[in-house]
C-alpha cells in the first residue's frame, strides 16, 4: 500500500510558495527541488509565476515518491534513509551554512548513487576534491548524514575508514598589538569594533555567537553573557564574563533586540565577513592570513599563558572536550617550553 498523498501547492503569508504532502504518515513542506535533486526553485520567480512553477515541482516530486513506492512493508533504500536524515537535520537549530553543506553533500551522493550507497562511491566523492581541507569538510558532513541515517535503521556505514589527504599544519597568527589594531578598527566601523572586542575578551565566535547576541543574553549589570547549547558550536550551555572595558561601551537596549541592529533581527550572515574584507584593504596593521578569528586565537593564548590551565581554556573557549583544546593549541603553536626546560651544559 502506498502511503503518500499528491503534493499540494500552498503559500505562506509572505507569498512564498511551497509543496505540502504526506508520506509514511509524515508531513513534508518543500520550498524548492533541491532535496529531490530537481532544478526547480519557484520562489526565485516573480509572484505571479510561482504557482505554475510549484505545480510542475509537485508533479516531479510525486513521480519520484511514487516510483520509490515508499511504504511500511519494505526496507527503505540507503538514499531514502539519507533523505530522511537530511530532512531531520534541516529542521534542527544548526547554522544555515552547515545546512547548506549538508544539502550539498546529499546532492553529490544522490547523483552518484541511485538506491544503495557503497564505500567506493563515497570514497570517489570525497577524493574528487583536490584540497585535503575540502575533503575533510565533505567527509565530516557525509558522516553526519550517515550517522543520522544509521540511527534510523540504515545497516552499513560506507564512510567508515576512508582517509583524506593530510594537510600540513598552519599556524594561526596571533595579533601582536591588540590595542593599536582595535583603535584602527574603532575608527573604521563601530559594529566591527564591538565584534572584535567580544571575540577577543569573551572568546565568542564572531559570525554566529557574537552576531546573534541579544540584550537578553546579558545579565542586568552586563557582567556576564549566557548562551544556551543551541546557540554555540559545542552544544553546551556557556557563561562568559564581560570585561569592564567592554561594558563601558555598551548601552543596553530592549531584551529581544540584537545588540548591533537595535531590532529583533540580527545582521545577515555575511555581514562581518564583508566588513572585515573592506577593512583589510585599508588597514596598515593587519598581517597576511589574519582574520576575525585571530582575535579569538589571541585571547586563547593570553588565557593559557596567564593560567597554564587547559581546563580553564576549554571552558573559556566553549570547546566540547580537552582534546579539542589540545588540537587548538597545537594549531596556535603555543610553546610549552622555555630556556630553563632545555638540556643544560656547564661550560
Image (cartoon, grey):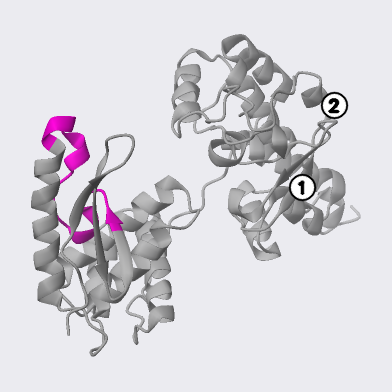
Kindly give the residue lying farthest to the top in the view shown.
Answer: 187
Query: What residue is drawn where x is 42% and y is 67%?
Result: 144
Kindly give the residue lying farthest to the right in the view shown.
Answer: 346
Q: Which one is closest to the eye, mark 1 or mark 2?
A: 1
Residue 209 seen in this snapshot: yes
Q: Position of residue 86 (x, y in %)?
A: 35, 64
User: Whole-Å distance between the Cαs marked 1 and 2?
Assistant: 16 Å
Label 1: few (<14), some (14–19) or many (≥20) C-alpha neighbours in 10 Å = some
Label 2: few (<14), some (14–19) or many (≥20) C-alpha neighbours in 10 Å = few
Task: Say which residue label 2 marks.
Answer: 244
Position of the N terminus, as image quadrant, is bottom left
Query: What residue is drawn where x is 47% and y is 27%?
Result: 271
- Marked residue nearer the N-terminal end (1 or 2): 1
Q: Helix or strand or loop: what does disc 1 sit on?
A: strand
Q: Does the magenta segment cover residue 331?
A: no
Q: Helix or strand or loop: what does disc 2 sit on?
A: helix
Task: Say which residue label 1 marks.
Answer: 239
Vertical position of residue 216 compared to residue 135: above or below: above
Vertical position of residue 73 compared to residue 59: above or below: below
Residues shaded magenta: 29-49
Q: Position of residue 74 (x, y in %)?
A: 23, 89
Nearest the viewer among 323 and 58 is 58
Amino acid at each position: 500500500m502506498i502511503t503518500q498523498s499528491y503534493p499540494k501547492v500552498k503559500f505562506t503569508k509572505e507569498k512564498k510558495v511551497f509543496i505540502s504532502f504526506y508520506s509514511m504518515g509524515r508531513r513534508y513542506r518543500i520550498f524548492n527541488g533541491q532535496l529531490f535533486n530537481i532544478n526547480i526553485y519557484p520562489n526565485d520567480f516573480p509572484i505571479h509565476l510561482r504557482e505554475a512553477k510549484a505545480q510542475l515541482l509537485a508533479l516531479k516530486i510525486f513521480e519520484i515518491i511514487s516510483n520509490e513506492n515508499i511504504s511500511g512493508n519494505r526496507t527503505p533504500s540507503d538514499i531514502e534513509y539519507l533523505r530522511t536524515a537530511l530532512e531531520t537535520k534541516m529542521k534542527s537549530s544548526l547554522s544555515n551554512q552547515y545546512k547548506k553543506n549538508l544539502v550539498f553533500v546529499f546532492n553529490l551522493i544522490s547523483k552518484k548513487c541511485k538506491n544503495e550507497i557503497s564505500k567506493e562511491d563515497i570514497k570517489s566523492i570525497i577524493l574528487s576534491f583536490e584540497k585535503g581541507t575540502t575533503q575533510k569538510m565533505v567527509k565530516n558532513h557525509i558522516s553526519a548524514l550517515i550517522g543520522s541515517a544509521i540511527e534510523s535503521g540504515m545497516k552499513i556505514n560506507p564512510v567508515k575508514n576512508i582517509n583524506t589527504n593530510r594537510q600540513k599544519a598552519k599556524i594561526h597568527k596571533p595579533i601582536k598589538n591588540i590595542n593599536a589594531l582595535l583603535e584602527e578598527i574603532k575608527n573604521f566601523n563601530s559594529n566591527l569594533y564591538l565584534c572584535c572586542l567580544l571575540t577577543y575578551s569573551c572568546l565568542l565566535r564572531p559570525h554566529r555567537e557574537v552576531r546573534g547576541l541579544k540584550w537578553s543574553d546579558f545579565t542586568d549589570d552586563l557582567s556576564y553573557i549566557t548562551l544556551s547549547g543551541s546557540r554555540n558550536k559545542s552544544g553546551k550551555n556557556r557563561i562568559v564574563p564581560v570585561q569592564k572595558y567592554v561594558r563601558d561601551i555598551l548601552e543596553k537596549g530592549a531584551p529581544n533586540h540584537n545588540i548591533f541592529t537595535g531590532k529583533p533581527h540580527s545582521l545577515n550572515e555575511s555581514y562581518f565577513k564583508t566588513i572585515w574584507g573592506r577593512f583589510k584593504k585599508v588597514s596598515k596593521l593587519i598581517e597576511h592570513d589574519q582574520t576575525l578569528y585571530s582575535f579569538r586565537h589571541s585571547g586563547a593564548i593570553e588565557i593559557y599563558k596567564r593560567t597554564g590551565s587547559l581546563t580553564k581554556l576549554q571552558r573559556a573557549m566553549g570547546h566540547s572536550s580537552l582534546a579539542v583544546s589540545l588540537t587548538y593549541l597545537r594549531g596556535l603553536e603555543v610553546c610549552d617550553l622555555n630556556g630553563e626546560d632545555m638540556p643544560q651544559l656547564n661550560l
